[in-house]
Amino acid sequence: NAGVTQTPKFQVLKTGQSMTLQCAQDMNHNSMYWYRQDPGMGLRLIYYSASEGTTDKGEVPNGYNVSRLNKREFSLRLESAAPSQTSVYFCASIQERRAGGQETQYFGPGTRLLVL
Amino acid sequence: AQSVTQLGSHVSVSEGALVLLRCNYSSSVPPYLFWYVQYPNQGLQLLLKYTSAATLVKGINGFEAEFKKSETSFHLTKPSAHMSDAAEYFCAVNPAYSGAGSYQLTFGKGTKLSVIP
């Protein structure tokens, strides 16, 4: 998980509360991604950012907003938390492959969110 | 559209035995394929990836996988299991194109590997 930090590590919310999950990378990668992991479901893409200032929806964007204000940071916001958003959230930082080259990718350690 | 099916949510092997974790994919375009490992309470670590250069891909920790287009499979193997291999393994697929924002991975549901001493 070198180079990708996520805060907080664990959070408990009540239904209707809001919070922002933070992700930061220091590898100068262009692209960052937010996934959620639920038991028996694998990881599902919530939102991604191909470059600073751009964001796009993934497979399960409802109930979330994101912000990529600079190249380092990509935050995920829950405006009104619901029990269905109880999950483990992973941020990934990826420098996509160039011609003849290899991509580099790192996943953060995750944020465990419990919504009561 | 793309999808991944991992056969077996839980696989148990004896220490020293062959590890075989199955992954079948569906993709409307040529795919890139990945295997990740996740240890308890940790993030994902890339084990290996297929990006059309060679059908047999070698990864870290002695794992390898073979891309078989005719079978739409990308099974993960290791000749001899170690106790340290106990973890959850995820197969993922991505359309085979490059560029910013291209890593919109579709994951399988995961296979938990137990290694019996």
Image (cartoon, helix red, strand yellow):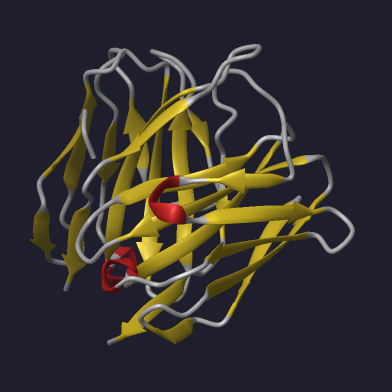
x, y percentage for residue A35? 40, 48
x, y percentage for residue B33? 64, 47
**Does B46 sit left or right of A17 as displayed?**
right
Q: How many marks?
A: 0
**Does A16 sit left or right of A30 as displayed?**
left
Tell me if I can see residue A61 in this picture: no
The residue lying at 34 percent from left, 35 percent from top is A106
Picture quarter with the C terminus of chain B: bottom left
Q: Quadrant of residue B4?
A: bottom right
Instruction: Name the one closer to the observer, A38 or B63.
Output: B63
Instruction: Name the one closer to the observer, A14 or B43.
Output: B43
x, y percentage for residue B45? 36, 47
x, y percentage for residue A77? 26, 41
The residue lying at 31 percent from left, 48 percent from top is A90
Tell me if I can see residue A101 in this picture: yes
The residue lying at 18 percent from left, 49 percent from top is A18
Q: Is residue A36 above or below residue A116?
A: above
Instruction: Name the one closer to the observer, A16 or A111.
Output: A111
Q: Is residue B46 above or below residue B116?
A: above
The residue lying at 61 percent from left, 18 percent from top is B99
**Does A105 sit left or right of B78 as displayed?**
left
Q: Is residue B61 above or below residue B81?
A: above
